[in-house]
Image: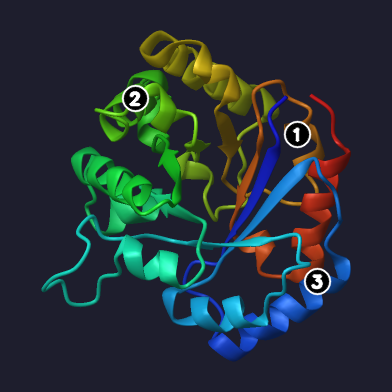
Amino acid sequence: MRTRLIAGNWKMHKTATEAVEFVYEFRKVVPISPTIDILLAPPFVSLYAVQQAMTTDDRFALAAQNLHWEAEGAFTGEISGAMLQALGCSSVIVGHSERRQLFSESNEEVNKKVKAALKHKLLPIVCVGETLEEREAGHTQAIVKDQLIKGLSGLDVENISTITIAYEPVWAIGTGRAATVEQAEEVHAFLRSIVTSEWGSVAQDVRIVYGGSVSPQNAEALFHCTDIDGALVGKACLDPTSFASICRLAAQASY
């Protein structure tokens, strides 16, 4: 049985001081359960502060929001996998729709970042998702398939087993308009079928999580779906009580 993953993507929110305050408050309310993994993904400038505030008893781990595919070099403003690993990160988000839409990140760049993450022992959370125009045109499956296959190109079964896929419909991110349970489950099942066709039975071990206006109000229904293995949470993860509620719902839900 796959262990659910709940990851909080803070995006460009919280100073280092605010991040530490979050950790202290979240620690008081986060559920203790062996059935879920929990990640916090603060901005780069707060990673060290959060890492220092965490203890060995905490039931959550540290993730990064992005990385560069090179290990070092003249890339002003970028962060390497080696740097993230040294800061205590265990995972990294790759190919988020905001990176694709706002910074023109291509499938080929996503692929290089995935490989860089794996090289530095970071577990990639690889995001795929369609725009509203693409969904209304009936292109959802073609878009997410293309993003998935190109983003994971060249990886073997062993690599694939360590990757989490995040389905994030662009039209649902930060809009308050989450995909319906039926819409989300349909795409999740389709993504798992693609992994099966490309890499075989390891697909049953790959976590596929949903992202896009996840909240305490809709999380329970999502977590009862067969192919939804957790959530990549945005706005609702910025409040420790709200995020803990989502984590608790994931811990209580059955497939």
Numbered badge on residue 77: none
Badge 3 density bin: few <14, some 14–19, many ≥20, Cα 10 Å: some
Q: Is residue 116 left or right of residue 22?
A: left
The residue that label 3 is drawn on is: 27
Measured in 3D between alpha carbons, the distance from the residue under mark 3 to the one under mark 2, in whole angstroms, is 37 Å
Secondary structure beneath label 2 = loop
The residue that label 2 is drawn on is: 156
Tag 2 and tag 1, C-beta contact below 8 Å: no
- The residue sitting at 29% across, 65% down in the picture is 80
Numbered badge on residue 223: 1
Q: Nearer the viewer, mark 2 or mark 1?
A: 2
Q: Is residue 96 above or below residue 44?
A: above
Q: Is residue 198 above or below residue 167?
A: above
Amino acid carrying mark 3 in the image: Arg
Q: Position of residue 217 (x, y in %)?
A: 80, 47
Tag 3 and tag 2, C-beta contact below 8 Å: no
Measured in 3D between alpha carbons, the distance from the residue under mark 2 to the one under mark 1, in whole angstroms, is 29 Å
Amino acid carrying mark 1 in the image: Phe
